[in-house]
Amino acid sequence: MNGDGNAEAIGREHDLTGWGKLMRSIPVHGHMALEMPVLSLKEQFRLAGIRLMEERGIGFVESLDFLDFIPGSGGWKESIRLWYTGLEKKEQRLFPGYLLLAHGIV
């Protein structure tokens, strides 16, 4: 960043993976496709006549890869991965990933 404190302020307002995604979006690191986050696809499934069978967040461990765009974050990434993989499946569901899995039957 430009050294005026914006990076520090942004870092406090976003989780670590969000900060990594921000770092990745800076042109020096490459560019990202347009993202359109959604919390649910229930209404779209209903309107399309598709019976929603399951909807849940996935990709928590995969989202840790965004930390690669923050210099020196390797230790954090591995610590978080070890902590998360040590949780029971029921506990892991409390920390959804950045992807929404929605599947249904026509």
Image (cartoon, rainbow, N blue to C red):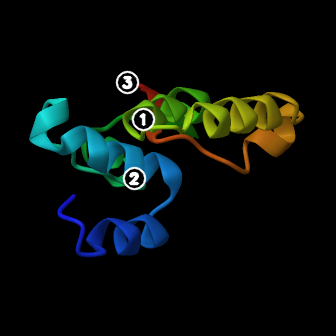
From what the image shows, is residue 23 above or below residue 86?
Answer: below
Q: Secondary structure at mark 1?
A: helix
Residue drawn at x 67%, y 48% as measured from the top left: 95
Which image quarter: residue 26?
top left
Q: Amino acid at mark 1?
A: Phe
Q: Amino acid at mark 3?
A: Val
Q: Which mark is residue 66?
A: 1
From the image, tell me which residue sits under label 2.
19
Q: CA distance from mark 3 to mark 1?
A: 35 Å
From the image, tell me which residue sits under label 3.
106
Residue drawn at x 42%, y 55% as measured from the top left: 39
Residue 47 in the figure: left or right of residue 102: left
Which image quarter: residue 11?
bottom left
Question: In the image shown, does 19 or 38 lie closer to the viewer?
Answer: 19
Position in image of residue 90 (x %, y %) = 84, 40
Residue drawn at x 22%, y 49% as measured from the top left: 36
Q: CA distance from mark 1 to mark 2?
A: 8 Å
Q: Label 3 crowding class (10 Å Cα cut-off): few <14, some 14-19, many 20+?
A: few
Q: Which mark is residue 91?
A: none
Position in image of residue 27 (x %, y %) = 10, 39
Mark 1 vs mark 2: which is more N-terminal?
Answer: 2
Q: Quadrant of the N terminus?
A: bottom left
Does the residue at mark 3 contact the one at mark 1 (Cβ under 8 Å)? Answer: no
Q: Secondary structure at mark 3?
A: loop
Which of discs 2 and 3 lies nearer the camera? The answer is 2
Q: Amino acid at mark 2?
A: Trp
